[in-house]
Image (cartoon, grey):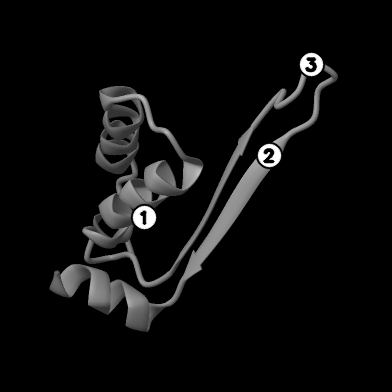
Amino acid sequence: YGMDYVFDYDPLIFEIDRIAKEVHYETQERLLTRIVAACANQDQVISIEAYLRKGPVTNKGGTLGIRLKVDAEHISHIRGK
């Protein structure tokens, strides 16, 4: 196995960065949904586990986050759209 079998993350990272900067997202869920769709568009991706976290969420600090796990069946559904 050589470098031909290594996934090149750079284009995906570029796309995620573009999505994140494209607009202001009212919810983390919407942003994460778009990131997951970008990942699912890569044929080599067979499952996704994505996390978003932001803070501080109050004047005293704290964090707020969400986690999304997507299996192969759901990725197929996303690709089918």
Q: Nearer the viewer, mark 1 or mark 3?
A: 3
Q: Amino acid at mark 1?
A: Val
Q: Residue at x 25, y 69 (%)?
A: 78
Q: Secondary structure at mark 3?
A: loop
- What kind of residue is marked 3? Asn
Mark 2 in CB contact with mark 1 (< 8 angstroms): no
Give the image location of residue 27, x and y in percent.
46, 39
Q: Which residue is mark 2?
A: 64
* Lateral position of residue 26 relative to residue 23, left or right: right
**Residue at the extreme bottom of the image, as rendered:** 73
Question: Does dot 1 land on a helix, a strand or a loop?
Answer: helix
Q: Which residue is mark 3?
A: 59
Residue 77 badge: none
The CA distance from mark 3 to mark 2 is 13 Å
Rendered image quadrant of residue 59: top right
Q: Residues within 10 Å of mark 2 (few under 14, many from 20)?
A: few
Pick the quarter of the image with the N terminus: bottom left
Q: Return the disc, 1 or 3, that comes first in the chain's sequence.
A: 1
Query: In the rendered view, would you say 66 is above or below 58?
Result: below
Q: Position of residue 42 (x, y in %)?
A: 24, 59
Left or right, 51 with respect to 35, comes to right
Left or right: 8, with 54 as reference point: left
Q: Amino acid at mark 2?
A: Leu
Q: Which residue is mark 1?
A: 36
Q: Residues within 10 Å of mark 3 (few under 14, many from 20)?
A: few
Would you identify the image quadrant in which residue 48 lies?
A: bottom left
The image shows residue 65, relative to residue 39, as above or below, that is above
